[in-house]
Image (cartoon, rainbow, N blue to C red):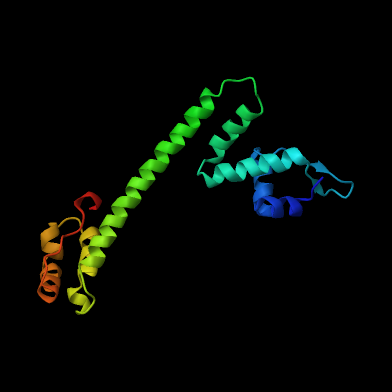
Amino acid sequence: MHSIGELSRRTGVKVPTVRYYEESGIMPPPDRTQGNQRRYDGDGFERLAFIRHARNLGFSLHAIAELIALRDAPDRSCQSAGEIAKAQLISVRRKIARLRALETELSRMFEGCDGQGASGECYILAAGRSHAVRHRPRRARAGQAHEACRARTGKAQEGPDPALT
């Protein structure tokens, strides 16, 4: 039997989080000593390790609860588990696509200015303004800073990514 502190150290899950998982029902209530201290057996350790791994994969607590219910009923079909994992994979792929778009935009901003001019002519700052002000055409918002950077660097710079505006 393990104390909550030992369980926390062994799994890397903080004590308040273990308590939260108990309150939310994804961790069963542990046995208690006569002094009312929580005591966890090997199953509690395995359950918490499973929860931590699932959280690291980005699963919601609701999805984890569903996965645990399937895990606790070994005779049930694993189709639901596959559907839950597929939904998470789709979500992760969408996040990756958004991050790639952000990377592209940040690269364009970074490459658009050599950092030598005044902030009023900075391509990075103009690109940021172009995303904050949506009612004016993009060329009008970033055009002057774009031209200033082009004049300093001698190369044409692309404007902000229209997909992110």
Name the residue: 83% across, 44% down.
Answer: 32
57 horizontally vs 20: left or right: left
Q: What is the number of callouts on the image?
A: 0
Name the residue located 31 percent from the left edge and 56 percent from the top edge: 103
Residue 75 in the image: state x and y as whole percent.
64, 19
Residue 44 rendering spot, x and y as whole percentages:
73, 40
Q: Quadrant of the N terminus?
A: top right
Please identify the quarter of the rendering in which residue 107 is found. Answer: bottom left
Horizontally, residue 28 falls left or right of residue 82, namely: right
Q: Nearer the viewer, residue 84 or 60?
A: 84
Q: Does the rendering let one see residue 83?
A: yes
Residue 149 against residue 71 in the figure, above or below: below
Instruction: From the top left corner, tell me how far across and down residue 139 is, in percent.
Output: 11, 60
119 or 81: which is nearer to us? Answer: 81
Corner quadrant of residue 147: bottom left
Residue at horizontal 20 percent and vertical 73 percent from the top: 122
Residue 68, placed above or below residue 22: above
Question: As drawn, is 108 to the left or to the right of 154?
Answer: right
Residue shown at 32%/51% (left/top)? 100
